[in-house]
Image (cartoon, rainbow, N blue to C red):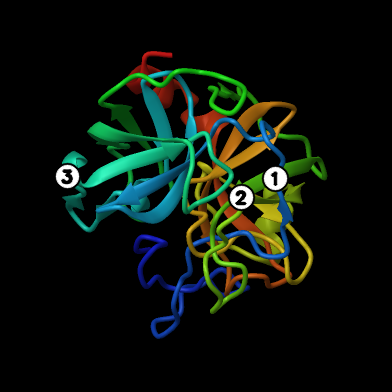
């Protein structure tokens, strides 16, 4: 798969990639506006000033996002083209902007699974009620658990980005059910989060957080078939990638 903020192959319900389809990057469809301080770990990742993806603060000096947000083919985005916005519910204003110093992509990322990257910030963040780190989960959420996903992504398949941070609750789906019903070739590092029609992740939400009981359990990777379909979204499992993330971010 290609990065979610560009043209991607769409995953068919049977789990087979169709040659002429397009995979889409997540944004929040059918979401609710977030409250001040509700998701203080959420950041907007900017490239040349424009929002491309979400991400999560994991320490004063590091954020985690999706690998496809910063890597296309063999090319990794130069750090000097990237910055984050933290501490604002609005995409267009507020909070703080901090340049990225270094970009580290998981060495096993080849477009399918291991879709995570760690970014070191040039300047340390100052934590407050709207800017804070989130802990990395050591376990996946239980099957059928309510999980929060959030982001500024598109509000429909062909819709605009949301200027307000939105969130929606989704359900953790067992790997067995996801493989049987939706995605035959489910990477070991990926979980499925199920939502009703006209809800879920979409363009611009890639790299953003999935949280359960105050911990980061997932990183937005892909949607199946299109935004807002009654099918799961793919999120990278922090439980499986935690050791690598913690090592690179010194947390």
Disc 2/disc 1 C-alpha distance (Å): 6 Å
The residue that appears at 55% across and 58% down in the rendered structure is 163
Q: Secondary structure at mark 2?
A: loop
Badge 2, how many Cα within 10 Å: few under 14, some, many 20+?
Answer: many
Image quarter where the C terminus lies is top left
Disc 1/disc 3 C-alpha distance (Å): 31 Å
Residue 223 place in picture, x, y as percent: 56, 63
**Circle 1 residue:** 34
The residue that appears at 68% across and 57% down in the rendered structure is 178
- Mark number, residue 165: 2
Q: In the displayed structure, does residue 72 sit left or right of residue 129?
A: left
Residue 184 place in picture, x, y as percent: 58, 62
Q: Secondary structure at mark 3?
A: loop
**Circle 3 residue:** 78
Residue 158 in the image: above or below residue 55? below
Residue 159 place in picture, x, y as percent: 56, 76
Toward the front, the furthest residue is 94
- Mark number, residue 125: none
Q: Secondary structure at mark 1?
A: loop
Q: Nearer the viewer, residue 169 or 191?
A: 169
Residue 215 in the image: above or below residue 173? above
Q: Which of the marked residues, 3 or 2, is nearer the chain's N terminus?
A: 3
The residue that appears at 61% across and 54% down in the rendered structure is 164
User: Are the residues at dot 2 and dot 1 in contact (C-beta closer than 8 Å)?
Assistant: yes
Q: Which of the marked residues, 2 or 1, is nearer the chain's N terminus?
A: 1
């Amino acid at each position: 798969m290609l990065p979610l903020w560009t043209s991607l192959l769409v995953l068919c319900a049977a789990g087979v990639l169709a040659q002429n389809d397009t995979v889409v990057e997540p944004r929040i469809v059918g979401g609710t506006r977030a409250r001040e301080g509700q998701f203080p770990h959420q950041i907007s990742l900017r490239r040349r000033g424009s929002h491309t993806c979400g991400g999560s603060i994991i320490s004063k000096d590091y954020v985690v996002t999706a690998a496809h947000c910063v890597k296309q083919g063999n090319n990794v985005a130069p750090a000097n083209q990237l910055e984050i916005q933290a501490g604002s519910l609005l995409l267009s204003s507020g909070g703080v902007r901090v340049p990225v110093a270094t970009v580290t992509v998981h060495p096993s990322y080849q477009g399918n699974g291991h879709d995570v990257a760690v970014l070191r910030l040039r300047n340390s963040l100052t934590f407050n009620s709207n800017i804070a780190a989130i802990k990395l989960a050591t376990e996946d959420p239980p099957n059928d658990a309510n999980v929060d996903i959030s982001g500024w992504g598109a509000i429909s398949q062909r819709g605009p980005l949301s200027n307000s941070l939105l969130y929606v609750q989704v359900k953790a789906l067992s790997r067995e059910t996801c493989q049987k019903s939706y995605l035959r070739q489910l990477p070991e590092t990926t979980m499925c989060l199920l939502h009703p029609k006209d809800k879920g992740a979409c363009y611009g939400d890639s790299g953003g957080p999935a949280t359960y009981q105050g911990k980061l359990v997932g990183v937005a990777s892909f949607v199946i078939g299109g935004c807002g379909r009654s099918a799961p979204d793919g999120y990278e499992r922090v439980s499986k990638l935690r050791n690598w993330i913690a090592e690179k971010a010194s947390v």
